[in-house]
Amino acid sequence: MTDFATDRRSILAGAAASAVLLTPGAALAQRGDMDAIRKAVAAGHDATVKRIQDWIKHPTIAAEGLNVDTGAEYMVGLAKDAGFQKARIVKTDGVPGVFATLDAGAKRWIGIYFMYDVKQFDSAEWSSPPLEARIVDRPEGKAIMGRGAVNQKGPEAAFLGALHAIRAAGRKLPVNIALVCEGEEEIASPHFHQVIADPEVLAAMKKCEGVIIPSASQGPNGNVTLTLGAKGAVELQLISSGEKWGRGPKKDIHSSNMARVDSPAWRLVQALDTLIAKDGHTPAVEGWFEHVQPLSARQKALIAEGARQSNEADLKRLMGVERWIGDEDFQTSLERLASQPTINIQGLVSGYTGPGGKTVLPGRAEAKIDLRLVPDMTKDEAVTKLKAHLVKAGFPDIEVNVSGGYGPTETPEESALVRAEKAVLERAGITYSLVPRSAGSWPGVVFTGPPLKLPAAQFGIGHGGGAHAPDEYFVIESSNPKVAGLDDATMAYVDFLYEMAAAK
């Protein structure tokens, strides 16, 4: 890997500099410009670290209704501090969004998507308090540990650091930026479409060449994963209750009554069993695969290349698994990961779950479900088919409460956005894998779908881990020469903005 920082190996040195400066993005920036920005990035390192730490200490957790207003206000402050001339809160029927513009008088506009909310946490599971954002020593190097460190406050703060550095260096931003932020990503973005529908937001986004969400996508071998899309996601709850069913108890009663009273908990289990085939993983909802598009030959080729660049044993070890479904080979498992829609049980809640037993017959049982969707499925289609299936299977009393969701995204490989991402990595000597679809989800469909129909993707170098899990971290000083630290990750965003400014 070639580093972006001035005090480490630089691709803009010696004879290599002559070749690099001929590339479109670098041609827009004079050598002195990039040197000055690099120095500003290094000088601003401590401020960027503090910005991440302070942000972690101000969590917004939509699922718990925590700081849903103050979190938006904090995001407005971050945007204004980074140089956005206009930044305001966008009200929704749920957690508010934030919209900001930085008009540098450039020819082109770029859209940037931020999430300012984070996932819930249990402090007892962490080795370091999740909201203290301590700097810890890890095998990967020095890292900030805290909820939201890598998902997504660390990468987003690195992007803001790029804007701070360009301004501190006295240089002009090469593109104009429309920043759109939401506070409900971790509950499947139930109201983000309302943010995009705001007339001022929609007008600004229509001017953009594409949209990125900052990320830290380097693996331990330094390889970056570039995605051409993401699965859609729907979060919902299936609820069985004696009150709604008309059978079983309306509240918990003594378990001896199981001999004569129906069980809402067993009814939920029976309903859940109809959703999946006997193999334990294939959705059995009627019509579920009706609009599922098979992988193209190109997509399969990209997956095969990604399999060759990945270490299956390391991945299994990190996941804590020993085998894939049906003992399939690695490439087949990756094809399945990209192409298959899923119906997953996140959790089951009913009755007493504390220490020991309580001998109750619960009056209510709930399953927390997530659906992962692939092209050309939609959220509304999936929910409609799921409800119809439950009725047809004899479970009309099972409540289906949808809490959020959106469809899948797709971005053309030949788009200017993807070409710019590849150019930045190639110029820096960073290897990358181009994958057709991330198995994870983000609400990019509001950008890639109508009316905007923009290319949208995740982008960024650097490394972190533990998203949605204990001990989440984001590396700020890498001990691995193949993996970027904070300053290099920041400079990559600088280079990306210049590359987008020159895109044809």
Image (spheres, rainbow, N blue to C red):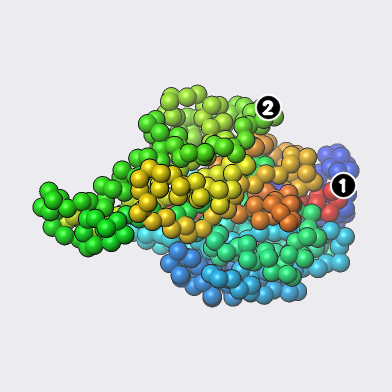
- Identify whether 299 is placed above or below 447: above
CB contact under 8 Å: marks 1 and 2: no
Say which residue label 2 marks.
297
Tell me: 381 left or right of 247: right
Circle 2: residue type: Ala
Residue 85 lies, in percent from the top left, at 75, 74
Element assignment for label 1: loop
Say which residue label 1 marks.
504
Q: Residue at x 58, y 29 (%)?
A: 307
Q: Residue at x 42, y 50 (%)?
A: 369
Q: Which quadrant of the figure has residue 203?
A: bottom right
| 334 and 347: which is toward the camera | 347
Element assignment for label 2: helix
Circle 1: residue type: Lys
| 287 and 57: which is toward the camera | 287
How many residues crowd around disc 1 within 10 Å: few (fewer than 14), some, or many (20 or more)?
few
Q: Residue at x 70, y 59 (%)?
A: 112
* Residue 453 visible here: yes
How far apart in space, not on screen, are marks 1 and 2 (Cα)? 27 Å
Residue 73 lies, in percent from the top left, at 59, 75
Q: How many marks?
A: 2
